[in-house]
Image (cartoon, coloured by chain):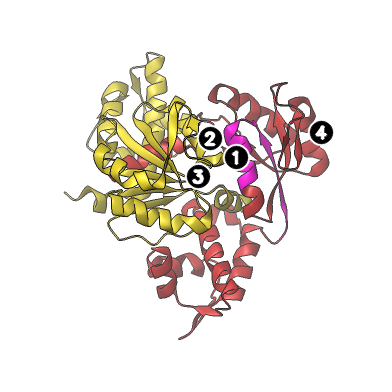
Chain colours: A yellow, B red
Amino acid sequence: MDKHQRIPDVVIKRLPIYLRYLDQLSSMDIETVSSQQMGDDLHLNPAQIRKDLSIFGDFGVKGMGYRVSDLSEKLRSILGLDKEISIILVGVGNLGAALCQYNRYQSPTTKIVGLFDGHPSKVDKTIGNMKVKPMEDMQEFVKENGVKMGIITVPAQAAQKVADQMIAAGITVILNFAPALLNVPEEVKVQNSDVTTELQALSYYL
Amino acid sequence: MDKHQRIPDVVIKRLPIYLRYLDQLSSMDIETVSSQQMGDDLHLNPAQIRKDLSIFGDFGVKGMGYRVSDLSEKLRSILGLDKEISIILVGVGNLGAALCQYNRYQSPTTKIVGLFDGHPSKVDKTIGNMKVKPMEDMQEFVKENGVKMGIITVPAQAAQKVADQMIAAGITVILNFAPALLNVPEEVKVQNSDVTTELQALSYYL
């Protein structure tokens, strides 16, 4: 099946949240969990959780709920997190450096393996344990390391150019923190993540 | 009407994206735009855009599309962005400091007005043009300034305590960057924003 056509993005976005929750349960030696309990803990509708998970098959055991280890293994496999994912980040300003540090401690599978910046003053700086490389090196690095995912943390006016360079190098999935709309070919997936947009959406709930 | 019951969160999240786009058009002196053009530029389905916007009334002019200024004004009003929104941020590590700097340049209406940190080494540091205050001052600050929105950028293990303190002070909307699930009363809105979760969801598209 063409999985990308059939599973809505909103469902995909919830899967890592389920996964983190299941990992927490697992660390507490809890072996099964009901959708009701998941819903209570995650502030989600249990019917929605059941519906989300049913897309991927039937993990529930009648009267027992879900087996934590089976379900988390399945989610990891669906998300492609059963192997390490290499990511590059372009734009090592405050935000880029912070995200890089932050992710390093949180996730063993989504791994930032290369840092790039177009500004000479940033090149050769060390962030975490990585040296920042010049943009000229990006294409070769991406190809050599088979990197498919990139994070953009450059200013808005530089974002499109960086996206174009990433895509030319072979990147197919972009997490864009620049407050700019990127023009990309249809086969490239862009997720915009922008604190200002989030704050503006949240102001609705005030 | 109880607007919070009737408009889905996914629609609300798209509104700031429409708004930014309309502001771009406006800066180029473009006065009208069709849903087709919006869809092309934003990589969204025009039918979805029409449906989203129809919730708030009929802004379209037959054969002309939407009037840019009317629509952006309406969106601003729906989101509550026609007035300034005061926000506090707790946790002035790398990420907190970066978000603070970043938002300062992007948004005139969502304004971070207070920075707090529980760690004595951070208190009295200056970020942008603001001094970091100790946690003990938060409650009074929030009450005096009528702040209703808070950003959490503390480590996971500190997040629940900070959320509790925010809610006790009168915060009703929280943007949480800590990779932790917060337990909050039903009337409090929490939006989790976590780069690791986003990367994990995106790995599905590789």
For disc 2, the marked residue is A98
Chain assignment, label 3: A
| Residue B50 visible somewhere in the drawing | yes
Chain-order first, disc 4 or disc 1:
1
Instruction: Give the residue type at disc 2.
Output: Ala
Residue at the image point whose x is 61% and y is 47% from the top: B102
The one of A9 and A48 positioned closer to us in this rendering: A9
Q: Which residues are magenta?
A: B83-102
For disc 4, the marked residue is B140
Q: Quadrant of residue B100?
A: top right
Q: How far apart, in angstroms, are the residues tagged by discs 1 and 3?
A: 21 Å
- Do the residues at discs 4 and 2 belong to one chain? no
Label 3's element? loop
Q: How far apart, in angstroms, are the residues tagged by discs 2 and 3?
A: 20 Å
The one of A151 and B116 positioned closer to us in this rendering: A151
Q: How many neighbours does mark 2 have within 10 angstroms: few (below 14), some (14-19), or many (20 or more)?
A: many
Label 2's element? helix
Q: How far apart, in angstroms, are the residues tagged by discs 4 and 3?
A: 45 Å
Closer to us: mark 1 or mark 3?
A: 3
For disc 3, the marked residue is A120
For disc 1, the marked residue is B98
